[in-house]
Image (spheres, rainbow, N blue to C red):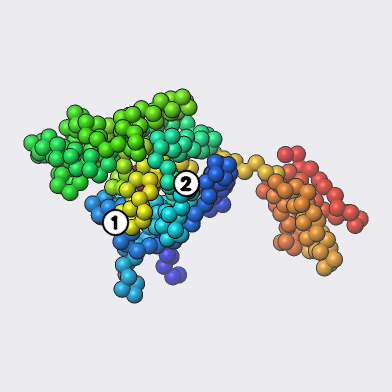
Amino acid sequence: MAEKIQKPKGTQDLLPEATIAWQHVETTARQLFASWGYGEIRTPIFEDTALFLRGVGETTDIVHKEMYRFEKSERDLCLRPEGTAGVVRAFMEAGLSRASKPVKLWYTGPMFRYERPQAGRYRQFHQLGVEVFGLATPETDVEVIALAWQLLESLGLKGLTLHLNDIGTASDRTAFRAKLQEHLRPLLPQLCKTCQHRFDENPFRMLDCKVPACQAAYESVYIDDFLKTPWTGIDSQAAFTRITTLLSALNIPWVQNHKLVRGLDYYTHTVFEITANTDGVDGMGTINTVCGGGRYNGLVETLGGEPTPGVGWALGLERLIALLPKHEDSSPLMVVLPSGNDGSSPQDWASAYQQAKTLRQQHPTATILLDTSNRAFKKQMEAADKRGASSVWFQRDGEWQQKLLGR
Ligand code: ATP
Ligand code: MG
C-alpha cells in the first residue's frame, strides 16, 4: 500500500461535527456586525513580505520567527500572519484613507504562524476581527471593545475579563525604553534567555514575559509616567479614564494590566485583551486569551497612507470554539424513502425528488434526506431510524405519507 500522506503539523481538518460550531459562531458574528454597521472585507491570504516587515515590525516574534515566507518570480511573499496589515493596505489601495467619513470593517479567515503547536496554538489558525478607521475618540475604543464583548457573551463564553493598558505612542515608548533599560541592566543575569535577547532589540516586549523571575523584575516599572503624547486634543490619562468610566457604565469588568504590551509594534495608546475561563478545557490552561487588540494611530501612515487613526481587535476562532458550550444541531431530520429495489420506476423516483423538494420548502429549518441507496424498503427504514430521523415519508397507493418515529 502506498504511504499515507498526513496533514501538515499544526493544521487541522474540520469535519462536519466540528463545523457546526464554526458555522454557529460565523452566523452569530455576521448578524452582529451587520447590525452594528460594520462591512465585511476580504483580502488575499498572501501579501508582499514588506507589508508585514513594515506594518507589524521586524523585531516582533510573528515577523522575525513565525512567517511562512517564500519567493516567486523574484517577489518576496508570505502567508499572512495576521489580518490588520492587509486590511490597512486594502483600505489605502481603495482610496478610503482620503475619505472623510469613518470606515468600519470586519474580516475572517486563516492566518499562518510557524509556532510550536499545542492546544489552542496552531500553524494555520483562524481569526475574526474588526478595524475602525478615521475616529480617534476614546468612545470608539469603547465601541469596538463592547462589540467584542457582546459577541463573546452572546456565544455563551464564561468568565470573561478585559485587560486594558495604555502604551502611549512610539515616541513615549522611546523615552520609556531608555528608562527601562537603565532599570533592568543590573538584573539581566537573572532574566530568561528570551528577555536577555529582547533587551537590546525590543525591551518593551520583555514586560510580556510569563517567566515568574522576569515578572518579579518588572513589577515596579510602569510606562504611565512616560505617557506624554495626547490623543487628538485629549490628555492621555484623561482619555484612559474616559474609556474605563464608560466600560464600567456598560458593565464590562476591566482590569488595568501595566504589563500588557501586546506582540505587535503598531499599537498606540489603548491595548487590550479578553481572557476567558479555561477550567476543564483540555490542555488550554494558560492559553486563555481569546481576543486582542488596540489603537494604531500611526499604522496607515507607516504604510504610506494619509495619517488616519485606527482601532481594532482580532479573536482566535480555534480558542473561542474550544471554550464554547457544545452546540448541538437541533434541526429535525426527515427522510424520504422511495419504494426501493422492489421496483422504483423513473416516475416513482421523480415523485420522490419532488416530495423532498416540497418538504424542504415547507420546513426550511429541517434537514430532508432522500435515500438514494436503492436498497430494500425495510433496510431504508432501519437506516433512517439509526440516523435519528424524527419521521420518514413514503408512498402508499400513490399518496405520500408520513410516519413519525417518536423523537
Ligand atoms: P499569544 O500571546 O497567545 O501567542 P498573540 O498575541 O500572538 O497571542 P494576536 O496576534 O493578538 O495573538 O492574535 C489575536 C488572537 O488570535 C489571540 O488572542 C489568539 O486567540 C489567536 N491566536 C494567535 N496565535 C494563534 C495560534 N498560533 N493558534 C491559534 N490561535 C492563535
Ligand atoms: Mg503569539
Give the Cα separation between the discs numbered 1 and 2: 24 Å
- Residue behind mark 2: 102
**Contact flag, marks 1 and 2 (Cβ < 8 Å):** no
Considering only order in the chain, which callout, 2 or 1, is on the residue closer to the N terminus?
1
Q: Nearer the viewer, residue 19 or 349?
A: 19
Q: In percent of the image, x 43 and y 47: which residue is there?
A: 133
Residue 290 at x, y = what percent?
41, 40
Q: Is residue 30 visible?
A: yes
Vertical arrangement, residue 213 with respect to residue 94, above or below: above
Side (left or right) of 361 relative to 29? right
Residue 403 at x, y = what percent?
81, 45
Task: Name which residue type carries label 2.
Answer: Pro
CA neighbours of label 2 inside 10 A, class few (<14), some (14 to 19), many (20+): some
> Quick one: quadrant of the C terminus?
top right
Q: Nearer the viewer, residue 145 or 68?
A: 145
The kind of secondary structure element at disc 2 is: loop
The kind of secondary structure element at disc 1 is: helix
CA neighbours of label 1 inside 10 A, class few (<14), some (14 to 19), many (20+): some
Residue 279 at x, y = what percent?
41, 32
The image's mark for residue 54 is 1
Quarter location, residue 228? top left
Q: Is residue 165 visible?
A: no
